[in-house]
Image: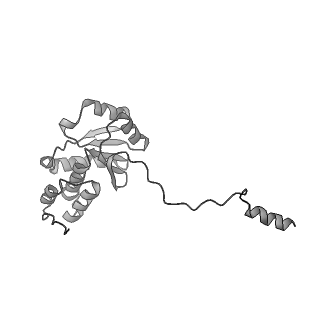
Amino acid sequence: MALVLLGLLALSPLTAQPPAPAGPAQAPATLLVNERHPAPGLATGGAPTTPEGFRALAAAGYKTFVDLRGDSEVTPEIQAAVEAAGLAYRRIPISGDKDLHLGTARELASVLAERGKEPVALVCGSGNRVGALLAVKAFWVDGVAPEQALAQGLQGGLTRLEPSVRTLLGLPAATASPQ
């Protein structure tokens, strides 16, 4: 009789059920516009627009905020908000393809090397200039093959500046894909 009761209890909905199988891990909330993660510890995309956005980056473990936006896009309050959130603020102004040169590529390489393995948020308005600078840095500073450098740029957010980046890397223009 005791065995029958134990068997019934085992089938009862009142007893603890085994945990449901774990599903895929939920992705963390995005902190940047068009956020991407082209390398460990590197988030790329468009910059946050509020002090809360900078605090969220710091709370997520980012240590450095590298701003690629041009002079007309940045105010002194932005640097103050970034630093008030506890992030180091670095700036490499990239207004367009004219600012994609060996000097800015080396400057990015220096900032990333200086930060080591600390998480870095690398931003512009959308992520496009970030991807462009990552591509030219990969090619000119890191010695990566042009096709691979372009791929790194695309992973980092490169979009509209792709034709200019292809030229800088010595690659042919992209061919239109058949529709």
Residue 62: horizontal and vertical position, in percent? 38, 44
Count the marks. 0
Choose between 35 and 13: the one closer to the eye.
Answer: 13
Residue shown at the point (19%, 55%) measured from the top left: 136
Is residue 83 found left or right of 13 in the rendered image? left
Residue 122: horizontal and vertical position, in percent? 29, 46
Choose between 177 and 90: the one closer to the eye.
Answer: 177
Answer with the quarter of the image where residue 10 lies: bottom right
User: Is 2 located above or below residue 51 in the figure?
Assistant: below
Residue shown at the point (20%, 50%) measured from the top left: 105
Which residue lies most toward the right here? 1
User: Is 100 located above or below residue 172 in the figure?
Assistant: above
Rendered-image quadrant of the N terminus: bottom right
**Which color scheme did the rendering employ for the protein?**
one colour
User: Is 163 located above or below residue 74 in the figure?
Assistant: below
Choose between 14 and 124: the one closer to the eye.
Answer: 14
Residue shown at the point (32%, 40%) measured from the top left: 48
Which residue lies most toward the bottom here? 178
User: Is 131 located above or below residue 8 in the figure?
Assistant: above
Choose between 67 and 174: the one closer to the eye.
Answer: 174
Residue shown at the point (15%, 60%) measured from the top left: 166
Residue 110: horizontal and vertical position, in percent? 25, 47
Is residue 114 found left or right of 56 in the rendered image? left
Is residue 178 found left or right of 10 in the rendered image? left
Rendered-image quadrant of the C terminus: bottom left
